[in-house]
Amino acid sequence: MAPPHDDSTQHPISNILFIIAMQTEASPLVNKFKLADEPNSVYASLSSDFVMLIYGCRISLFPNGVPWVRYSGKYKDLNINIVCPGKDTTLGVDCVGTVSASLLAYASIQALQPDLIINAGTAGGFKAKGASIGDVFLASDVAFHDRRIPIPVFDLYGVGCRKTFSTPNLAKELNLKVGKLSTGDSLDMCAEDEAAILANDATIKDMEGAAIAYVGHLLDVPVLFLKAVTDIVDGDKPTSEEFLQNLNAVTIALDLAATKVVDFINGKSCSEL
Ligand code: ADE
């Protein structure tokens, strides 16, 4: 008899993990899905639950002391978790960037075993490639633009270009713009980064996407990238000013799109996306 065929892309999706870098970006979605703020712990798995309950103990979902935040709940037929890297313990600002995003993605996948990850957030957009403020993009490809290693093959490793999980039905049904995403750890853009972004053929630029794609690839979890444009990188306004000016308004567009994406996903398998 042939062994059972375990193709998880054919099962209905039941467990979605949002990874969102900034609290401002996450809060409206937490409210929309009526998610609860979870303490940094879960009860132990079934067999030891009994023992844990007797002693009133809880086992940490994330390591003690990390600022990571998790919200969870049920929306339609889906278990939804939203995780954020939280606030830097010294400076009190959101832990944006690839280092926190990678660690959080790794720990969250290990703990929550999601069927699908959605990295939702804001991005800079290139008007020369058709991006405008408030557009919400689905990324078709991701790559890094600030990992310069000019040695054969290491150069390709540094750029880390990869195709994202293909969701043609989702893009079509929701009429989302599709473009390539380039990731780096800076909000601004130096000349070297600009050349790399051009080489990556990117329409949008963020600070987490390619890092989360790397972790998803390592642990074999599909990742979607939903990015709303807060600033025009090839425009005439200073990036940080334009970003802060548009952050709240663009977050509304992002959350509207994310809700539509979740409504579309509900009841479907990954292979139907
Ligand atoms: N997030 C929002 N705007 C950005 C930009 N210009 N670069 C990187 N990440 C961003």
Image (spheres, rainbow, N blue to C red):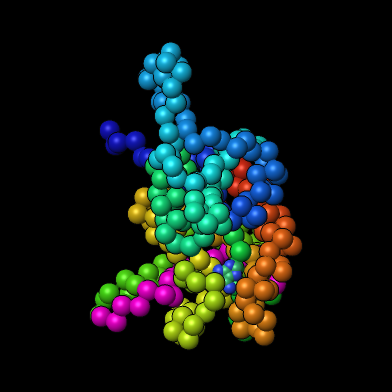
- Number of numbered discs on residues: 0
Would you place residue 172 above or below residue 8 in this image?
below
Residue 216 place in picture, x, y as percent: 41, 54
Q: Is residue 77 visible?
A: no
The residue stretch that appears in magenta:
133-151
Pick out the residue farthest to the top: 54
Q: Is residue 97 visible?
A: yes
Residue 91 place in picture, x, y as percent: 52, 57
Q: Residue, x 64% and y 38% (percent of image)? A: 35
Would you place residue 150 above or below residue 184 in this image?
below
Q: Residue, x 53% and y 68% (percent of image)? A: 206
Q: Is residue 157 magenta?
A: no
Residue nearer the viewer, 51 or 272? 51
Q: Is residue 40 left or right of residue 247?
A: left
Q: Residue, x 34% and y 36% (percent of image)? A: 4
Residue 194 place in picture, x, y as percent: 49, 83
Regarding ligand 1, which quadrant of the image does it lie in?
bottom right
Q: Residue, x 44% and y 42% (percent of image)? A: 65
Would you place residue 27 above or below residue 14 in this image?
below
Would you place residue 111 above or below residue 242 in this image?
above
Residue nearer the viewer, 118 or 246? 246
Quarter of the image for residue 110 reads top left
Residue 208 place in picture, x, y as percent: 49, 62
Quarter of the image for residue 31 reads top right
Image quadrant for the N terminus? top left
Pick out the residue farthest to the front: 90
Q: Is residue 139 magenta?
A: yes
